[in-house]
Amino acid sequence: MSDANGTITSREVKAEGHDSDDGRTGEGKATYKSWKKKYRKMRITFDQKMHDCEELHRQESHALATAKRIAIENE
């Protein structure tokens, strides 16, 4: 079932695992994929990054306002 180089074809690998493309195992039971957990985790990470970004933007605008105020006072 191997070619001249000794490599295994994808058909042979699929036959060994008895898995089909629809995510079912050999017994017919569907595998569990936690999409909710995955996207909830991604959403939490995204919200944290956005919060950090907003905080940095707030600090930057505060620093620019302070620099502008000091520049006006020094004139």
Image: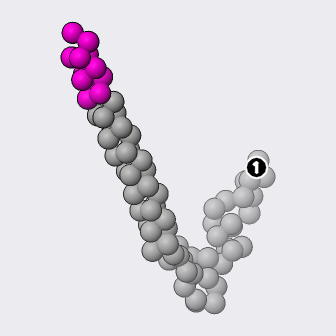
Q: Is residue 39 left or right of residue 30?
A: left
Foreground residue, 28 or 64?
Answer: 64
Can you say whether 43 is above or below 28 in the image?
Answer: above
Can you say whether 44 is above or below 32 in the image?
Answer: above
Q: Majority secondary structure of the magenta segment?
A: helix
Q: Can you see residue 35? A: no
x then y, percent, for residue 16:
71, 73
User: Looking at the image, which residue is at 34% across and 33% down?
Assistant: 60
**Residue 74 drawn in magenta:** yes
In this figure, which residue is indicated by the disc labeled 1? 4
Magenta segment range?
Answer: 64-75
x then y, percent, for residue 24:
56, 82
Which residue sits furthest front? 73
x then y, percent, for residue 68:
24, 22
User: Looking at the image, which residue is at 49% across and 72% down?
Assistant: 37
x then y, percent, for residue 54:
34, 46
- Quarter occupied by the C terminus: top left
Foreground residue, 24 or 9?
Answer: 24
- Badge 1, how many Cα within 10 Å: few under 14, some, many 20+? few
**Residue 5 drawn in magenta:** no
Foreground residue, 8 or 53?
Answer: 53
- Quarter occupied by the N terminus: bottom right
User: Looking at the image, which residue is at 37% across and 50% down?
Assistant: 50
Q: Secondary structure at mark 1?
A: loop
* Chosen colour scheme: one colour
Residue type at the position of mark 1:
Ala
Q: Can you see residue 39? A: yes
Can you say whether 4 is above or below 41 in the image?
Answer: above
